[in-house]
Each structure stands twice: as structure tokens, then as C-alpha cells.
Amino acid sequence: MNHLLKLLDLSNEEIIELLNLGDQLKYELKHGIRHQHLKGKTMGMIFQKSSTRTRVSFEVGMAQLGGSALFLSARDLQIGRGEPVQDTARVLSRYLDGIMIRTFAQQEVEDLAKYGSIPIINGLTDFCHPCQVLADLMTIREYKGGLEGLKMCYIGDGNNMANSLIVGGLKTGMSVAVATPAGYRPDPAVLDFAKPYGDKFLLTSDIRAAAEKADVVFTDVWASMGMEEEAEKRRAAFKGYQVNEELLGLCAPDAIVQHCLPAHRGEEITDETFEKHANEIFDEAENRLHAQKAVMVKLMAGK
């Protein structure tokens, strides 16, 4: 494992190894055990999309590991003014020990890895969100004791979260049911990946069928960052694709709810359901820190 570009690149064993390391680093932090695995290392954080959780968790995580992080917005870099990504990759590789990028096109992340000589971490693209889903899997294990044999349900847009949840869930032994409106399905490459899993994967427009006996329920905003102009159209298309108490009545009695945040309460999830499951959702948000620290240690320690 030289980069974290997308979960499609990782084996089940690599995913579990990252989750185990995340658990260990979380335990050490909670018990005051210093773990300066990246002392003297510097990571650049390129943000072409704004963020709360991604920036804070990576910056704090790097500091806890003994290293430092540089916040680099598109305004700060020549890449935002037309410099080819391959040139940026080769320059930054001579200054930094790793790069985390949060951007639009998956190809930009792939090109950084292709032309650079340091580890690249995908902090989010329009195609996938691997760091978030590692945190999600970590949270499910904490609440359920494992992943194998559980049923994951996702309700909403077939976006980057849906893409990564399908891959992460299936690779770790879960069954995955996804309910999206027609025209908002997950990426074809992800659906091709899921085909060999047979009845362990369900894609439907029926939220009730997707939610039946689910152990964990995911949702996300109906209009992701960059889709603001489609917001009204999407509100109409996604009407009824909501996680609420009625839907949870179809799930396993001890089902947990997860949301990558920010949440639009009253749209994809009701305020009542969000608050009932707030501990689970904010444990999930916290685990971004621990899961990403595991990624940084795996990719950057000892190199």
C-alpha cells in the first residue's frame, strides 16, 4: 500500500489492518500514550473543496503523530491557476513527506500519485470518500463487535459516499443494500465491482426493501458540494428518501445510524432520528481522526 486513492485499490486484509491500527491509536490517545510515529514529517493538505472535519482531523492527527501539516487552498497554489498537476506533484514531492488532497476529479488524485514520489491520500473526490468510510467501518465495529455478516443500508444519492460504502462494506464481509431514485445510481465502475457479490448486494429504488433487517443505516445530503444549482431538482427527486423512525422500524432492533455530516435535518434525516442516534453519528465523526492517523502512519512512517 503506497497511497490511499480509493477503496477499490485495497484488499480486505489492508482495510482490516488500517482499522486495527486506528483502534490501537485511538486507545493510546485516550490513555495518554504518546505515539510520535511521524516526528519530523510534513504533510501538505490541498483543498479545492472546503471542509470542517477533513481539515481539522488531518491537521490535529498529524500534530498528535509528531509531524506538521500545511493547509494549501487552491488560491495558494499554482495548480489553481493552471499549472499541470504533474508539475505540482513533482515539485511538492521534493518538499513534503505526503499529500492529502480534497478535490473534485478523481483523475487529479490519480495523477498526483502517478507523477509524484510521495504517498497521496484522497481526502474526498466526486467519485469516492475512502477516509470517511474507513471511519464508518471503524465505528460499526465498535458498536457491533465486527463487520462480517452484518447488513449495511444506504438511503439517498448514489454519490461518492455510496460508492465507497458499497466497496468497503462488501470487501469486509457485509451485505449492502442501496436505495436511490432512478437517475441517481452509484458509479458504473462500482456497480461492476459489486456484481460478483450476487445477493450480498442490492440496488433498488425501494427504501423499505433496502432497510429491511439492516444493522446499520447510512444517509447523506441530497445535494453534495458543487451541486447547489441542482438543489431544488434534487429535493423533488429525493422526496421520501429519508431516514426516520418509520424506516428504522423495518431495521434490526439495535440498528445504528450513521451520517458523514454535515446533515440537512428535515431532508435526508429527521431531527428526531438524528438526535436519537447523535452519539453514534459523532463517534463516527471522531473516528475520522483515528482512521486517518492510521492511514498516515501506514503510508508515511519509516519512509
Image: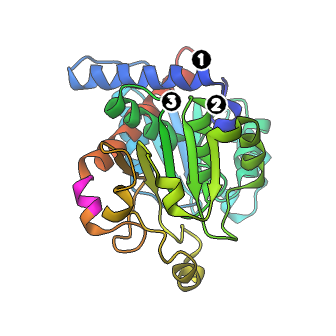
Report the quarter where the C terminus lies: top right
Report the quarter where the N terminus lies: top right
- Callout 1–callout 2 Cβ contact below 8 Å: yes
Residue on which the image places disc 3: 149
Task: Say whether residue 209 is magenta.
Answer: no
Left or right of 210: which side holds 282? Answer: left
Residue on which the image places disc 2: 119
Q: Quarter of the image holding residue 9?
A: top right
Please name the residue shown 24% across and 47% down the image. Answer: 279
Q: Nearer the viewer, residue 110 or 222?
A: 222
**Identity, as a three-letter code, of the amino acid under mark 1:** Lys
Count of numbered circles in the view? 3
**Identity, as a three-letter code, of the amino acid under mark 2:** Pro
Left or right of 110: which side holds 147? Answer: left
Q: Which residues are magenta?
A: 273-277
Left or right of 166: which side holds 140? Answer: left
